[in-house]
Amino acid sequence: MRFFLAGVMQGSHTEAVVCDQGYREEIKRLIKAHFPGAEVYDPRADHSDSITYDDPTGRSVFFHHNRMCREVDVLLAFLPEASMGTAIEMWEAYQHGAAVITISPMEHNWAVKFLSHELYADLQGLQLALESGRLKRRIAEIREKSVPG
């Protein structure tokens, strides 16, 4: 199963800064523990200095990641605050049949609300859904419905 780990990087900052990325390791650990053999793509892992990229490089990486979201089985988004890039990734994944799983307190935000198949307020909610097996069953159900035929 192929996962794309989406999440806030720059958020709403107007300066060239990156939000705390500590959530990424914890989410990858949870995925690997509950989906043995899963491929987890973390865009930050290969592009930790992306804030310094020139425009052509940044554009190339941005569009490449959006195309990748069309090809995954699951997009797992971490959104403690709004993120335009993550919203685009969620849209691409949703439109192409991936299960979109979101961790966010923004339950009234339309992009979060209408593009998420499952929504958890925090990492603890995600962990409980994984431990109970509920999320694994839900992903299978979503993926089954997205297969043509």
Image: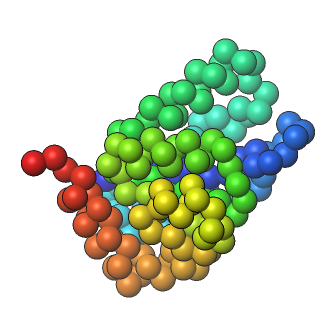
In the image, what residue occupies the spot 45% across and 53% down? 75
Q: Residue at x 70, y 54 (%)?
A: 82
Tell me the colour scheme of the image: rainbow
Extreme top residue here? 56
Residue 36 is situated, as x and y percent measured from the top left of the image, at 33, 62
Is 19 positioned to the left or the right of 28 in the image? right
Is residue 7 shown left or right of residue 21? left
Quick check: can you spot residue 144?
Answer: yes
Instruction: Give percent across and percent down for residue 37.
Output: 32, 56
Looking at the image, is 16 positioned above or below residue 80? above
Q: Residue at x 76, y 45 (%)?
A: 10
From what the image shows, is residue 35 above or below residue 43?
below
Comparing 128 with 98, the one in front is 98
Q: Position of residue 123 (x, y in %)?
A: 59, 73
Q: Quadrant of residue 140?
A: bottom left
Left or right position of 64 against 9: left
Residue 70 position in % (x across, y down)? 39, 38
Which residue is situated farthest in the left direction here?
Answer: 149
